[in-house]
Image: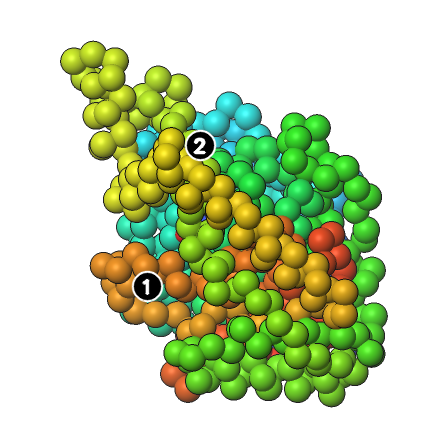
Amino acid sequence: MFHVGQGLSFALSNTNGLPAIVYFNNVLSGGTVELYNLSIDEARSAIDSGEISPVELINAIFERIEAVEEKVRSYVSLTKEKALTQARQAGGDIKRDVKQILLGIPIAVKDNICTEEVKTTCSSKILEDFIPPYESSVTQRLKEHGYILIGKTNLDEFAMGSSTENSAFGYTRNPWDIERIPGGSSGGSATAVAADECIAALGSDTGGSIRLPAAFCGVVGFKPTYGRVSRYGLVAFASSFDQIGPITKNVKDSAILLNIISGHDPFDSTSANLPVPDFISVLGNDIKNIKIGVPKEYFIEGMDKEVEDYVKEAIKKLESLGAIPVEISLPHTGYAVATYYILATCEASSNLARYDGVKYGLRVDGEDLVDMYMRTREVGFGAEVKRRIILGTYALSSGYYDAYYRKAQQVRTLIKQDFEMAFESVDVIITPTTPTPAFKVGEKTEDPLQMYLSDIFTISVNLAGVPGISIPCGFTTNNLPIGLQIIGKHFDEESVLKVAYTYEQATDWHKRKPNL
Ligand code: GLN
């Protein structure tokens, strides 16, 4: 950790009227670092030392959004006026010496997380005008720590997808190559972080939706253990999988946000009533003799050669830092995608039954009540959401329930046991986050099965409920980020963060910025 004034002096310069920071002893390759480049940790130091104000920071972020948003389209909506008001208040609070870790820090939130009085659309026509009358527990906690909401980020409709192309409001582009998708479903949040349109963001992960876009966009994405973070106010997709987590510029910021959002919540009966450790305090602990499992099933035929090479390189790096790689087997890996797509669609078909034109959002009038339901759902849902509702309803119907739903639940248990067995001999598991780097816009939209296979390395983690992070571990020859996945035992986010942080400190991948 560094503080302003600890070998790193900031100077404020005013180029084109924009507030800018120059690091004299620049950690980031000797160039100019703009305010919007800052991490949470750096912004906190710069604000607390009085070198920048929350208003300057928020202005820098909105100017950045103005400059690049047209290219990347991270946001569904922006909350500029509110954010400016909050930034002014934060400035006053700082003068009064109020101490809150996120005071004045601009954060983006995925648009399936309810924000009181701020539209929450799930990138679906059916919720296009839905304004939640309440705050999700995670954003409530961010509020209590002083954050400023910048806006709501784009996603695959109801978080169903791997590319952010399933949004009813247009797709988001990858900041490293705008001809490519950013990954999904939290593509808007990952892009907003990678393109410096916010300081950090929240996403949600049901089968990989935090880690996959984090990998494709070259940022850090963490899916906590199922039950670690409250789902209250997260619009439900598949409730036994969904978890909210941070998408950030580095591992320390991930720990900072995790400290805030974790913990028992009486509003979510699946949130675990366990003590929350201080995730920051484990960063920097050495990883000597820590055992890292490398599952042989995760280096498969057909995976991208550069991805494979960089991940193997990363394992060597960890070894040089004291970790001990051990080959392991997760024998039921091959069933994960099929199992997930049965269970997740079953849960989705049930969860999405609530959108009937009566309780929320869109209503399309019909001849009678049933006709109104049907028209509303016909117009309100996109193709992928409909496909999943149909699949899930089919798999749950009498006569098929035992063959599909029940069977898939049994396989889920086997997959969970694979992890439990592996963790008897290793501390963390290392895999690639994705089999390929970001693909081209439109490349997989015609073939849902191909799209589903993008999640092949992330899905088992949700089936088992264990925590997993994706951190940058390399770039392809055409400059696309590659992600390294680190998986931990249930409620052992600390080991995951410790290994991730140690690797990050020994490499420079997370410092690269897309050229926008
Ligand atoms: N891509 C997976 C799906 O389409 C996972 C989505 C997610 O994690 N929300 O279901």
Under mark 1, the amino acid is Gln
Give residue 42's position: percent from left, percent from top. Answer: 68, 63
Q: Mark 1: few, some, or many residues within 10 Å (few <14, many ≥20)?
A: few
Which residue matches tag 1? 450
Residue drawn at x 64%, y 61% is 418
Left or right relative to 100: residue 310: left
Q: Secondary structure at mark 2?
A: helix
Question: Which numbered dot is residue 351?
Answer: 2
Left or right relative to 237: residue 255: right
Left or right relative to 448: residue 10: right
Give residue 419's position: percent from left, percent from top. Answer: 66, 61
Residue drawn at x 53%, y 45% is 409
Under mark 2, the amino acid is Asn
Note whether residue 109 is visible: no
Placement of the C terminus among the 4 image quadrants = bottom left
- In the rendered image, the vertical position of residue 254 relative to residue 4, given as above or below: above
